[in-house]
Amino acid sequence: MDPEIKITGEPSKSGDRCAFTVDRPLFPGESAHFADPAGAEKSPLAAELLLLSGIESVLIADNTVTV
């Protein structure tokens, strides 16, 4: 597997969300929704994203992260 991770982002038409597609699965065949850092122990990525100003929730589904 290529050590460089490739990520592309696409904002929603309304501008309130952005979906990031990663070149490899993050949760293979699964999805998870996180609304607070304390509840994101299953995903260090989600926990870190939720600490950023303006991020209210994180949805991770296979290789897509939506904030």
Image: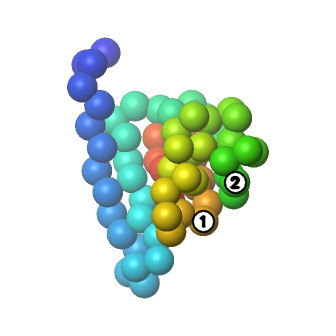
- Give the label on residue 36, or none: 2
> Percent from the top left, x then y, of residue 26?
51, 33
- Residue appearing at x 73%, y 44% in the figure: 38
Q: Is residue 16 left or right of residue 46?
A: left
User: Of 48 and 57, which appears nearest the observer?
Assistant: 48
- Residue type beneath disc 2: Asp
Can the viewer see residue 32?
Answer: no
Secondary structure beneath label 2: loop
Q: Marks 2 and 1: in contact by CB < 8 Å?
A: no
> Percent from the top left, x then y, of residue 24?
40, 31
The residue to which callout 1 is attached is 56
User: Of 2 and 45, which appears nearest the observer?
Assistant: 45
User: Of 37 and 28, which appears nearest the observer?
Assistant: 37
- Residue type beneath disc 1: Glu
Q: CA distance from mark 1 to mark 2?
A: 8 Å
- Residue appearing at x 31%, y 15% in the figure: 1
In this rendering, is residue 42 above or below 53?
above
Disc on the earlier residue, 1 or 2: 2
